Amino acid sequence: MELKLLIKNTSYLVFSRIIKFLVGVLRAKLIAIFLGVVGAGIISQLTMITNRMSQFTLLGMNDGLVKQIAESRSEILFKNKLAVLLKSYIVVAFIIFIPSFSLLLIFSKNITIYIFGDLEYYNYFLFGLFSYPILVLNSISFALLKGFKLVKYIARSEIIIIGVNFIIFIPLVYYFGILGGVIHIAFSFLSILIVNNYFARTKIFKDINLKISDLKESKVSFNSVKELLQFAGIGITSGFAIIISEVITRAIVVKNLGVEGIGIYSPVESWAALFTGFILPSIFIYLYPRFSESKSNVVIVGLINDTFRLVSFIMLPILMIAIPLRYQIIPIFYSINFTSAGDFLPGHFIGVLFYIWMMSLSQVFTPTGRIKIYGLFLIIISSIDILIVYFLVPHFGLYGWMFKFIVSPLIFFIVYFQYLKPRIKLRIERDNFLLMCFVAFAAILLYGQEFIFNLAYYYNLLIGLLLLSFSFLFIKPSEKEFTIQYLSNLIKKIKN
């Protein structure tokens, strides 16, 4: 039953993510045409810095709010409890936001020079800075939708936002150039807030008869604030570690291989981000609150096994098709100058497989009160990444950079499993264990045979498709029946 719910909820978000990707490709093309290299750089940097500012203000507290909502939904006086949780979150978020915003405003000119390289873009930075409060406000609506597991409405919200923002984007960049692109960033954040807030109010507030006046009259909960601050503390330490690791490792690559090294590898990272962007958010929006509300380790272990099963089936066709066709596809989407990126794609994608398994286990930690040890694990991962790149890149070039994406996920998939095994009696069911072994073996075999036989890509593709066909042996009869019924219903909806 849980697997069916997981598939159903995941399918909602995968569809919206595909639309988001396709629109993103078209948007990037329009930016290149109308704004040029400089404009594209400004838009990219401004979006990045605005999102980073929001993340450092929230410091993971929005996940804390999701956890609190999910845990409290079974309480009799849930309406009153939700009002208390929301007020507590709002008070803490804005207590942190005010000094953060003030510091950013004070040092805004210095940050402009650091981010954009020139003070002439100061006004553009101010647009991003004053969009920042909107992102903080939106975290409340999104946490509500996620806490109530309203995945369908999160997906619906994303599709509406994508459509509205793209329609507004075209005239803005056409008539106002870079300024239009900057204005569009602020407008896109505002549209996210409006749409998410609409669904939160109509599907949650209205359903439980919660009013804004109830929030004003409710009291701040000390226990809620304490837990949110715990999330914030872990968020700031592990968050800094991750960012420092990213900066240092990239600096090592640039020092040894030049910026061209990062550029050559960029198609591999982009494709990996595309697939993890489809899979991980789609699953975790459902999984995180489900773990938070689960009172039984049996339920949690069952959810983990369902997740392993689903992501393994999703990754298998990606691996079996991407590995053989990588040298043909990369020049189409980029150029012939990026063809050598295909050397690193198989290893990186095998790393992605372990990364997704590792991240599936990581979702257990914070909802079950193991946030401190998880923060420590993140710091250790960041340190290992620095050591791998420091020692391997000077000797092995981009293969050393590739190993960064393999070693940590592999090690910490095992570490997370061994840590959780005695604490929640975690075990991988036999059917799922065999499936996971097959997926990993098939990917390694497909990659390895290229070095032995040196076959043409179409022979490698046939081998990949043959290995893919064996996956049908792992599908249970009930899963086949559910998949056929689900696709049949989906086709009927499309026709109607």
Image (cartoon, rainbow, N blue to C red):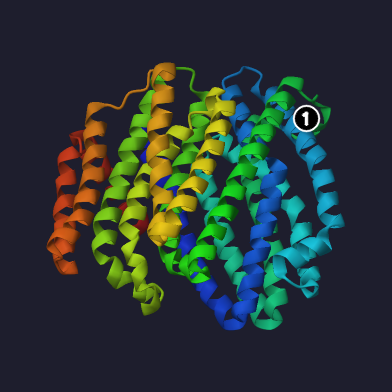
Q: Name the spot of residue 381 as percent of width and height, x first.
A: 50, 40
Q: Amino acid at mark 1?
A: Asp
Nearer to the camera, 23 or 435: 435
* Total residue callouts: 1
In the image: residue 207, left or right of residue 6:
right
Nearer to the camera, 273 or 85: 273
For the C terminus, the image quarter is bottom left
Nearer to the camera, 361 or 144: 361
Tell me the element at label 1: helix
Q: Name the spot of residue 236 as percent of width and height, x first.
A: 67, 39
Residue 285 sits above or below residue 246 on the image: above
Q: Name the spot of residue 184 as percent of width and height, x first.
A: 68, 68
Q: Pointer 1: what residue?
A: 214
Q: Name the spot of residue 340 as percent of width and height, x first.
A: 35, 70
The residue at 56%/82% (across/down) is: 33
From where the camera sits, is residue 274 visible? no
Residue 219 sits above or below residue 392 on the image: above
From where the camera sits, is residue 456 visible? yes
